[in-house]
Image: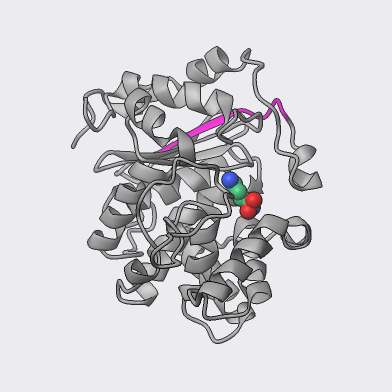
Amino acid sequence: MGTAIDPRGYDIDALRERVLPERAGERATSIPQLADADPELCAIALALPDGSVRSTSGGRTPFSIQSAVKPFLFALALADTDGRALERVGIEPTGEAFDAIKLESDTGRPPNPMVNAGAILTCALVQGGSPDARTDRILTGLSRFAGRRLDIDDAVARSEHLLGDRNHALAHLMRAEGTLAVSADDAVAVYASACAVLVDAETLAVMGATLALGGVNPVTGERVVSAEIARDTVAVMATCGVYDGSGRWMRAVGVPAKSSVSGAIVLSAPGSLGAALVSPPLDEQGTSVRGRIAAAELSAGLGLHVFG
Ligand code: GLN
């Protein structure tokens, strides 16, 4: 599906100015680094099929990717297992919070790869015989989506590992159900590192574009995953990417997306573009308030709604 309006002429700076006065929402408090995030950070970035990338003020400010990493972890797990990851993790929306202690009752599988349980599992499915090897594989894979070498914020990774009690609980539950093949602590350690990868709005937009454009990075021209994996990933973003806000998101914005507690949202508009919005204050579902408003405006302005 092509965009109705040429995104090259769209004024993202004016959009940023319109959402900046919005004061609702609270920063995440799960780790000190997120609690201390700048609430005034507000950035919008677009990555287009011609490889052009542009952003507003703040578009190069680094932040930890957090749950916006989950679609890419799923894609890498699909690639590394020849699609068999789909037997190990469900793809149904939960209608519950991102960290709900819940597995599929009949199979013991995580409900989908966009909630924490599912992402802890997809981290364990990527290639590598040790936590360090899997972390390396994830970092290399994410860097190909981004088109540049990414790094982990070690302090954030340590905080996530130390303070992620619900993630440890989920990993132990999956061990008990026989769905997680590696130790619970190893699984959480790799997931914590994946959440702590540093990106900026421009980078995240390129990552979203790579999924939106059939698995080929529009900046480097490199095929990162197959077209089928890119399509499967975007489909699951559409149904599960905004947790228990996914239905409302799909109606109001209509662009497959993934939210995160750092206030970043990655959007993959199929066949059209990738975008990223970041602003730390979150609503009850853990979605950036300014990001949600900007995404709806961007979608309407560019004719991106997949059912539009
Ligand atoms: N690292 C966070 C966690 O596991 C990610 C959650 C999110 O961004 N929604 O709690």
The residue at the point 55 percent across, 67 percent down is: 139
Residue 231 lies, in percent from the top left, at 26, 54
In screen coordinates, is 115 left or right of 232?
right
Whether residue 192 is visible here, answered yes or no, is: no
Residue 71 versus residue 25 in the image, above or below:
below
- Which residue is at the front of the view, 62 or 170? 170
User: What residue sits 24% from the left and 60% below the top?
Assistant: 227
Colour scheme in use? one colour
| Residue 261 placement: quadrant | top right
Where residue 133 sits, quadrant-wise, is bottom right
- 118 vs 237, nearest the viewer: 118
In this rendering, does residue 245 appear at all? yes
Q: Residue furthest bottom?
A: 129
Q: Of residues 148 and 142, which is closer to you in this image?
A: 142
The x and y percentages for residue 258 are 46, 43
Left or right, 298 with reference to 14: left
Relative to 93, residue 225 above or below = below
Q: Is residue 87 magenta?
A: no
Q: Identify the magenta region.
A: 39-47
Is residue 79 positioned above or below 56 on the image?
below
Rendering coords of residue 232 (x, y %): 28, 56
User: Along the horizontal axis of the image, is 151 left or right of 95?
Assistant: right
Quick one: quadrant of the C terminus? top left
What residue appears at the point 61 percent right and 41 percent down from the top-left corner? 60
Q: Residue at x 40, y 45 (%)?
A: 240
Where in the figure is residue 264, as x and y percent of width and height?
56, 39
